[in-house]
Image: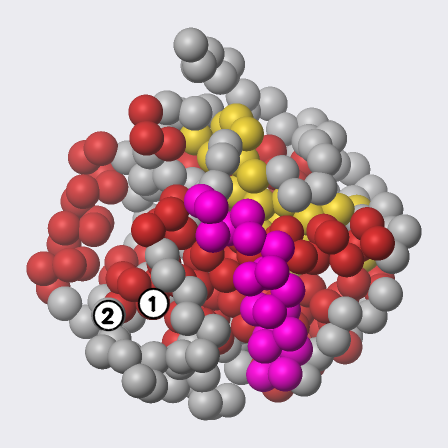
């Protein structure tokens, strides 16, 4: 019988450590940044809208800095990486969910660009200056996902917003596994971990383009899910606890919807090393960014 994980919210002290949290102006990113700063870390809020980022930073105590990052724009990713300096932990948190079909400035489908390619590029650009780990924030939606490497931009298939979201979250876990494989093969002490927040009440469903979907997503998570502070605990666990590379943390309650952080499993596709390698190769070709170690 699987034991329920014990309550965990005692994030250890992070004095002298520097974190970058993408998408940190609200929701899970803001709660993650808040706790890290409270525990003594220096935290960079990497956000698309610096005014909103500054307003968010004003609600956090400690050492907090705001930097501009549009993770869906590779030029913005490169600009942030070039001027950032040494970082202990990169938390790849920014994301979109079930948005209408659109192409980014680089020509990529929005979920692919925001949830995967931008963070793929940012991670590889920062690897030479990272000192501890990369955290990938994904979703349990990866379990029902299908990743078509020949149609990543949904040009030949009928576009389905939730399917596109799920595919990008599957890409997150494949990226995690291949990144850790490469780090280990290179003899690096860096590690890559991942987390998913289960059902957490945030504003991520606000841009679906459908009032009904936005309402159901918002109120559904409020009724059956966790508040943002608790949903952020899985990310904080993956970012601060001494866990091996390729560890995946999620809520320990029924169906991984709610509960305290614990190690969780992943889908068969997310464990496919060949799929992970092929996605990495496609990602390098699309972003022009390669593994530097």
Q: Residues within 10 Å of mark 1 (few under 14, many from 20)?
A: many
Q: Position of residue 52 (x, y in %)?
A: 45, 65
Q: Nearer the viewer, residue 252 or 203?
A: 252
Q: Classify residue 231 by image quadrant.
A: top left
Q: Position of residue 27 (x, y in %)?
A: 41, 50
Residue at (50, 61) in percent of width and height:
171
Dot 2 lies on which element? loop
Residue at (47, 52) in percent of width and height:
269
Q: Position of residue 98 (x, y in %)?
A: 28, 65
Dot 1 lies on which element? helix
Kindly give the residue lying farthest to the right in the view shown.
187
Question: Can see residue 88?
Answer: no
Location of the N terminus by quadrant is top left
Q: Give above or below for 287 relative to 51.
A: below
Residue on which the image places disc 1: 164
Q: Relative to residue 75, is residue 115 drawn left or right?
A: left
> Does the magenta-highlighted stretch encompass residue 281?
yes
Residue 47 — which label? Answer: none
Q: Nearer the viewer, residue 253 or 95?
A: 253
Q: Nearer the viewer, residue 198 or 85?
A: 198
Kindly give the residue lying farthest to the left in the view shown.
212
Per the rendered image, the range of residues in magenta is 267-287
Residue on which the image places disc 2: 160
> Does the magenta-highlighted stretch encompass residue 95?
no
Location of the C terminus by quadrant is bottom right
Question: Can see residue 270?
Answer: yes
Residues tagged 1 and 2 counted as in contact (Cβ below 8 A): yes
Kindly give the residue lying farthest to the front in the view shown.
274
Q: Give above or below for 252 relative to 287.
A: above
Residue at (90, 51) in percent of width and height:
187
């Amino acid at each position: 019988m699987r034991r329920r994980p014990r309550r965990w919210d005692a994030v250890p002290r992070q004095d002298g450590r520097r974190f970058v949290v993408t998408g940190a102006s609200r929701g899970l990113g803001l709660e993650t940044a808040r706790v890290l700063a409270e525990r003594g870390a220096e935290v960079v809020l990497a956000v698309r809208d610096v005014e909103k980022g500054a307003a968010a930073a004003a609600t956090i105590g400690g050492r907090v800095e705001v930097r501009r990052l549009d993770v869906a724009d590779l030029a913005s990713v490169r600009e942030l990486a070039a001027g950032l300096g040494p970082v202990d932990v990169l938390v790849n948190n920014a994301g979109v969910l079930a948005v209408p079909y659109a192409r980014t400035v680089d020509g990529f489908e929005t979920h692919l660009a925001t949830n995967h390619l931008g963070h793929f590029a940012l991670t590889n650009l920062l690897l030479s200056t990272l000192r501890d780990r990369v955290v990938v924030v994904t979703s349990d939606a990866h379990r029902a996902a299908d990743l078509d490497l020949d149609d990543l931009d949904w040009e030949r298939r009928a576009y389905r917003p939730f399917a596109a979201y799920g595919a990008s979250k599957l890409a997150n876990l494949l990226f995690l596994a291949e990144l850790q494989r490469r780090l280990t093969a290179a003899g690096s002490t860096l590690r890559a971990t991942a987390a998913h927040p289960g059902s957490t009440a945030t504003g991520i469903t606000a841009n679906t383009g459908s009032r009904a979907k936005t309402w159901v997503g918002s109120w559904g998570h409020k009724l059956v899910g966790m508040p943002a502070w608790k949903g952020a605990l899985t990310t904080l666990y993956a970012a601060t606890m001494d866990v091996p590379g390729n560890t995946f943390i999620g809520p320990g309650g029924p169906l991984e919807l709610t509960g305290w952080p614990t190690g969780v499993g992943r889908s068969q596709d997310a464990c496919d090393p060949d799929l992970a390698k092929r996605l990495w190769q496609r990602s390098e070709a699309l972003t022009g960014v390669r593994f530097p170690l």
